[in-house]
Image (cartoon, coloured by chain):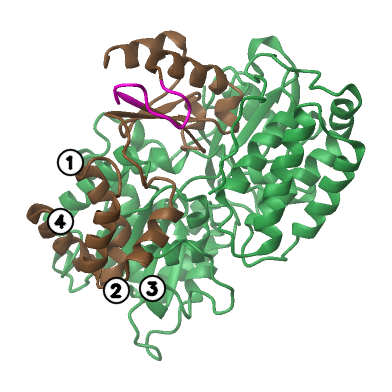
């Protein structure tokens, strides 16, 4: 089933992998133990992560080691510094961090300890989306176990190294996955993203130096420290090394979260891992990395799944979460579902986003229900161009505009067909039911 | 209305995690919602404002921003059906309809007698196991008609 070598999810397959006993027998905390014994220069740890080429797995693909190196020099800036682990996984299609939190919490905790050593952190906050109750509980239990075993807190393993790790529960807002929205939320406020600059490394949580990293990014760190950057670069592609957790959902035979090397073709994930499009149907379109990356046509399926290759076809690698639509699916309905989502999740600070997401939602709803006009199609386009690129405080506006522009580029005929026929030509087809009974709720 | 003593004791521990007390506000609202009837009443907001030394309107600002916080009393059981894309593609619409039939509640409403509240929610991060709903804080995944009838029927 798995033709490519794996390491990220190996422990998660063991019975009771979430317990300290099983995790330690499998080698958990070996990397931090070695670091606390050898006491390397913390900068060397960051450099190792840098040379591994690890890129953030939360969506932007920013190099993790480089991000760490933006934290101010501890000899010149003695303010307390923090890391927030972004476990607010809520990009539609994305369901990978949940598995790590639930099945291998000690792996994440070890990553936090290494990050704490490298950056001289005062404390780490693991911000888990509120709905993830079981993953949160697993993390909290693991944290309690690790603390009792002297692996977290003061004087860890008798080394003199201190690090506090705390669990924090979010409350269902997508925008808190944006790093500055997350920080506001962690401070107990509405999750309104902050204008940048100042950047979190200089002015983050409570105004102190802060780095915000995705769960899967931090989870990779113990592997890099145990086996080295060179070993890590043996996986994946030159510009995007390593394996990643690829969630694949929608119209496939075997939806799931699969560990695959970066650079694998989308077609291989679909056909070899997910068993192909379900019910013997053909593919209409696919999202490469979560809903914000836009619907692509099937002829792009041979594109390698890595940051630069997906960027090369005018999309984004995002969270690597593929969503597949079969030939019976309606792209207008899919667009409407997503436009509704972005409308619901816009924090409301920027007018382009607050108004734009609402308009997109209403227009897609109109077209899907046979009340759209050709002027609406043009309006979608001009609206979306008014929402991107970089016109707002954060990227939620872009995240709503990009899938709109993608569907206009690749599936314009189907949208026009809705307008011309005055109805959805695909209504009632499997897994894609009519939308006329949807109520509009605006947060 | 004062918060129950045991809850206050818990909040006293919670605030110690952070350099500033206010950071504990969202986890504290969660605990209040769990302990005080599944919603945040105006009284609870006042009590939280007192506890944190902030204005009630600040608590309201936070409560109203986050979809998980409720400002009206829910039924005994809350069914939150995901309707985002991965679930929609695998029949979330039909699942939602079935949930409404079995519970007797409308979307966004509570059944007569107060047994069930049904709501439609955005992506819950269980996309590879769609369709799904959350029932009283527990995920139920890979749903079909029979599963829905069984899970909810057992509660009736």
Q: Are marks 3 and 2 on the same chain?
A: yes
Question: Which is more foreground, mark 2 or mark 4?
Answer: 4
Q: Are marks 4 and 3 in contact (CB under 8 Å)?
A: no
Left or right: residue B117 compared with residue A335: left
Q: Which mark is residue A21?
A: 1
Q: CA distance from mark 4 to mark 1?
A: 39 Å
Number of marks present in the image shown:
4
Report how far apart the C-alphas of labels 3 and 2 lie in the structure: 9 Å
Does the residue at mark 3 contact the one at mark 2 (Cβ under 8 Å)? no
Given residues A377 and B17, the one toward you in this image is A377
The residue beneath circle 2 is A122
The location of residue A384, given as percent across then percent down, is 78, 52
Q: Nearer the viewer, mark 4 or mark 1?
A: 4
Work out whether A104 lies above or below A351: above
| Nearer to the camera, A345 or A238 | A345
Picture colour for chain A: green
- Same chain? Circles 4 and 1: no
Q: Dot 4 falls on which chain?
A: B
Specify whether residue B110 is painted magenta.
yes
In the rendered image, residue B78, in percent from the top left (x then y), is placed at 34, 30
Q: Which residue is identified by label 3?
A: A119
Residue lying at the far bottom in this picture: please name it: A76
What colour do you see for chain B?
brown
The residues colored magenta run B105-116
């Amino acid at each position: 089933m798995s033709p490519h070598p794996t390491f990220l999810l190996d422990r998660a397959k063991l019975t009771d992998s979430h317990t300290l006993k099983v995790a330690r027998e499998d080698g958990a905390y070996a990397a931090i133990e070695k670091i606390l014994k050898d006491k390397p220069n913390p900068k060397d740890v960051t450099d190792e992560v840098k040379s591994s080429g690890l890129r953030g797995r939360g969506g932007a693909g920013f190099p993790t080691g480089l991000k760490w190196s933006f934290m101010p020099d501890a000899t010149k800036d003695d303010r307390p510094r923090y890391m927030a682990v972004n476990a607010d996984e809520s990009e539609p299609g994305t369901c990978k961090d949940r598995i790590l939190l639930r099945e291998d919490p000690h792996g994440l905790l070890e990553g936090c300890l290494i990050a704490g050593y490298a950056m001289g952190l005062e404390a780490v906050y693991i911000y888990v989306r509120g709905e993830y109750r079981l993953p949160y509980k697993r993390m909290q239990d693991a944290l309690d176990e690790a603390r009792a075993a002297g692996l977290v807190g003061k004087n860890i393993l008798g080394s003199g190294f201190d690090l506090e790790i705390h669990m924090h529960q979010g409350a269902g807002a997508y925008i808190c996955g944006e790093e500055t929205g997350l920080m506001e939320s962690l401070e107990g406020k509405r999750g309104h993203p902050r204008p940048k600059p100042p950047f979190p490394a200089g002015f983050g949580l409570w105004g102190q130096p802060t780095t915000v990293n995705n769960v899967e990014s931090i989870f990779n760190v113990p592997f890099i420290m145990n086996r080295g950057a060179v070993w890590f670069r043996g996986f994946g592609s030159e510009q995007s090394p390593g394996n990643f957790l690829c969630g694949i959902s929608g119209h496939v035979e075997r939806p799931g979260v699969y560990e695959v090397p970066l650079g694998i073709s989308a077609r291989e994930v679909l056909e070899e891992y997910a068993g192909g499009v379900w019910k013997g149907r053909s593919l209409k379109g696919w999202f490469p990395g979560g809903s914000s990356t836009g619907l692509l046509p099937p002829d792009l399926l041979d594109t390698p799944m890595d940051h630069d290759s997906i960027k090369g076809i005018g999309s984004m690698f995002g969270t690597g979460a593929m969503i597949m639509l079969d030939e019976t699916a309606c792209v207008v309905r899919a667009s409407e579902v997503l436009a509704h989502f972005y409308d619901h999740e816009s924090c409301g600070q920027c007018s382009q986003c607050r108004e734009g997401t609402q308009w997109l939602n209403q227009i897609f709803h109109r077209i899907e229900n046979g009340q759209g006009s050709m002027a609406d199609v043009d309006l979608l386009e001009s609206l979306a161009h008014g929402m991107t690129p970089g016109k707002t405080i954060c990227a939620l506006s872009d995240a709503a505009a990009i899938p709109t522009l993608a569907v206009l580029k690749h599936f314009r005929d189907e949208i026009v067909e809705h307008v011309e026929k005055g109805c959805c030509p695909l209504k009632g087809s499997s897994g894609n039911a009519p939308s006329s009974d949807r109520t509009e709720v605006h947060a | 209305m004062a918060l129950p003593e045991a809850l206050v004791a818990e909040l006293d521990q919670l605030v110690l995690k952070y350099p500033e007390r206010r950071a504990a506000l969202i986890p504290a609202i969660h605990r209040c919602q769990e302990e005080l009837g599944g919603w945040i009443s105006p009284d609870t907001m006042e009590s939280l404002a007192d506890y944190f030394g902030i204005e009630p309107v600040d608590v309201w600002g936070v409560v109203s921003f986050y979809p998980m916080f409720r400002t009206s009393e829910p039924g005994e059981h809350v069914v939150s059906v995901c309707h985002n894309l991965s679930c929609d593609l695998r029949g979330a619409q039909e699942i939602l309809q079935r949930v409404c039939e079995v519970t007797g509640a409308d979307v966004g409403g509570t059944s007569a007698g107060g047994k069930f509240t049904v709501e439609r929610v955005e992506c819950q991060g269980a996309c590879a196991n769609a369709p799904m709903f959350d029932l009283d804080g527990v995920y139920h995944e890979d749903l079909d008609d029979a599963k829905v009838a069984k899970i909810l029927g057992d509660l009736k």
